Amino acid sequence: MNILIICEGNTDKHLIGFHLEKKENYKYQKRSEFFTIQLEKNQFQINLSNQENNITIVSVGGKTRIFSFFEKVKEYISQVRDKQKLINKIVIMIDRDEDSERDLLNMFNNKISNINTWEKMSISNQMFDEVDVDFFLLVIPPESNGAMERFVINSLKDKYDYIVDELEVCVDNISKKNKEFRNNERLKDKAKLGCVLSILSPEWSLDKLTEKMKQINWEELDKFNRVYSKIFK
């Protein structure tokens, strides 16, 4: 089965990759077995597979580029002539931020009925008339406002509450004296996550965020894995 996962940025891409590698026993591959769409500037992909599935994860460079890339994927599916290259499942991961469920569905011109639920989508194809694709819009966090950073913080808190609680208070106190952070919850959460990861993996504290994240035992975080496992059922 060929599965395409579309997400906003590189952090999302790496997190789902960690889940697939550590929890679902996927292996990273240099090339995709099915995905050949030319990516634009600031768009990146990684590829993984196991004995049953091929997965390509694409970070498109922000929430505002999700829908246009989704339309490009549908156009790609409409032209595929080799059945082995068809995309069988599409998962789109987006941050909830402050958006309502209706706001999120409106992003896709109401072509999608629900969030966090599998549904069928029929796409016209030159060779096969129509192909059915399973579709899942995964909204993070699944049950509250916020973005990927808040979801990861809450996931880490289940295991490292003594670290997360102290650092949240610290960053909140600092933000009261810093205009840039004061009214920006997303920035505060980015700062909090950076602090937490630096404590958990201090040897990587001067390196890139992704390198810090690799040191975390993501397979041990139940909340984190429970959400991602929905898209592989």
Image (cartoon, rainbow, N blue to C red):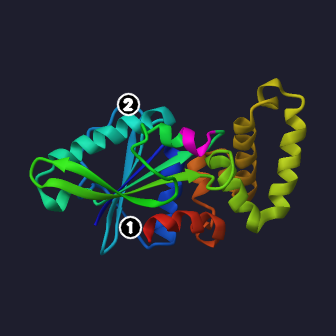
For badge 2, the amino acid type reads Lys
Q: Is residue 102 magenta?
A: yes
The number of numbered badges drawn on the structure is: 2
Query: Can residue 221 be seen here?
Result: no
Q: Which is nearer the eye, 29 or 145?
A: 145
Indicate the position of residue 229 as horizontal and vertical percent values.
51, 68
Q: Is residue 3 left or right of residue 220?
A: left
Which residue is rendered at x = 83% and y = 49% of the image? 168
Q: Secondary structure at mark 2?
A: loop
Pointer 2 local density, CA inside 10 Å: few below 14, some 14–19, many at least 20: few
Q: Which is nearer the eye, 53 or 95?
A: 95
Pointer 1 local density, CA inside 10 Å: few below 14, some 14–19, many at least 20: some
Residue 115 disc label: none
Indicate the position of residue 139 as horizontal and vertical percent values.
55, 51
Residue 27 disc label: 1
Q: Secondary structure at mark 1?
A: strand
What span is in magenta?
99-103
Please tell me in which quadrant of the rendered image residue 70 appears.
top left
Query: Can residue 105 be seen here?
Result: yes
Residue indicated by mark 2: 41
Q: Is residue 9 left or right of residue 200?
A: left
Which residue is rendered at x = 85% and y = 34% of the image? 175
Q: Which is nearer the eye, 10 or 224?
A: 224
Q: Is residue 168 left or right of residue 76?
A: right
Please tell me in which quadrant of the rendered image residue 27 appears.
bottom left
For badge 1, the amino acid type reads Lys
Indicate the position of residue 141 as horizontal and vertical percent values.
63, 52
